[in-house]
Image (cartoon, rainbow, N blue to C red):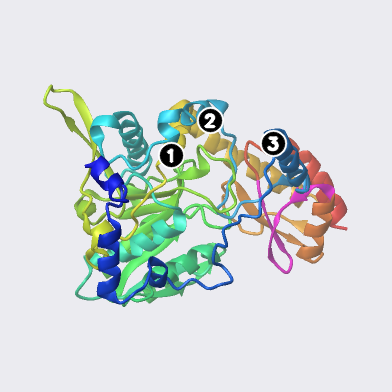
Amino acid sequence: MTDRYHQAGGTPFAPHTEAETAAMLDAIGAESEVDLFDIPESVAFDGEFGIDARTEREIREECGRLFGENDDLVEFLGRNHHGHYVPSLVDHLADRQEFLTSYTQYQPEITQGFLQALFEYQSILAEVTGLGVPNASMYDAATALGEAATLAARLRQVDGTRVLVPELLCPGRRSVLDNYVAGTDLVVETYPTADANVDVDALADAADDDTVMIYAENPTVRGTIEEHLADIGRIADDAGALFCLGSDPVALAILEEPASVGADVVVGDASVLGMPTSYGMGLGLFVTREEFIRQVPGRLVGVSTDDAGNRAYTLTLQTREQHIRRERATSNICTNQAWVALRTAIHAAMLGASGLVDLAETCVREAEALAADLDSIDGIDAPIHDRHHFREFVARTDRRAAAVRDDLLEAGFAVHVVGDHEVQVCVTERTERRTDDLVAAFEEAAR
């Protein structure tokens, strides 16, 4: 067959002879294939890439010059992008050829290794959340939140349109959520917070029979640990709404188990393990209750046995509508972050249960110690929220926060400005050895 198509001027991948192509073009009234596309002249390919050929050495030297232009800063930045130390073992294992070149694991007979790794990833998330059905990863925390909202709508198809989120929700996540609900009947509304945590009374007043989902975070975007999760769960239950909780695998090692406080869905960024700070790229975790298993977006890896009785892994409960009949799909997420999920699983397995707890406790201890040191500086009040904190906290500055930030940048440190006189500082095990230097820089910047 291949030879016949080659002889006819076609290829085995697009087996159209010149006669077949001419007949199709004639049927639709086009002179050539080019007429089928409307590409603006300004972006049309003119046959030249405009890239001069260079040797490997020349390219490495050029990249070195470009990277050298980056600011050399110690980043005490957080707000949903948290950098933890990634052991070199993660790179060595994840960079194996069979992982890097793997596409979606549709053929289980040849992808058992990767499928098992994804199953272990799912098992880790089930362990830290207490919920039974994690998926095999999503793009990021924001898309996971959007998928949670549409899942809630599918479960309440007869009535209910309101999705309630905290007023402090990170703008990026809110924007993605708004995009997700555009074109549906869902409406996103905010509820008040009190000292960075949920204002429970205000939330109870806001929730009603028209509410399909209530979203809260632990820790919050300001680093505070939410103290009223069980109350939020009861409010959602009374309203007949889903309770969606945002968190991450490191925090969940020591914070309240989502299942125990009534959470129906847990979303967040799992790439706090396995990936350095990637400035936007993440790994969306999505875990829910077993009764919602047929509404889960993305992919699930299941375990069974083969004909010989051996344990075997395969993708399961994934409808083809997701790929080819999108108007009937439960979700239009058709790919995932399998390789990043693999890195997360490797990192979590390497730490083990006790190592994960130790890392989480470091995030509490170091944040508390750094806040106390900054609070001792004239002109700095830290933390401003009377709460326990995880990784990060907000400090008030007598000077304008932007001026403080700029002076810190000059000293080689980066923090977030979150108000006219508020900066947010995040510390992990990657930056804990530079906290004394940061405090000294704050002493100068606060004057």
Q: Mark 2 belongs to which amino acid? A: Asp
Residue at which label 2 appears: 91
Residue at which label 1 appears: 339
Residue extent of the magenta highlight: 411-426
Q: Which label is found at residue 55?
A: 3
Q: Position of residue 296 (x, y in %)?
A: 27, 54
First along the sequence among labels 1 and 3? 3
The image quarter containing residue 399 is bottom right
Residue drawn at 54 percent across, 40 percent down = 275
In the rendered structure, the answer to whether residue 366 lies left or right of residue 232 reads right
Q: Position of residue 85 (x, y in %)?
A: 59, 35
How many marks do you count on the picture? 3
Answer few, some or many: residues within 10 Å of disc 3's Cα (few below 14, many 20 plus, some between 14 and 19): few
**413 drawn magenta:** yes
Answer few, some or many: residues within 10 Å of disc 2's Cα (few below 14, many 20 plus, some between 14 and 19): some
- Residue 159 sits above or below residue 121 on the image: below
Gap between marks 1 and 3, in whole Å?
30 Å
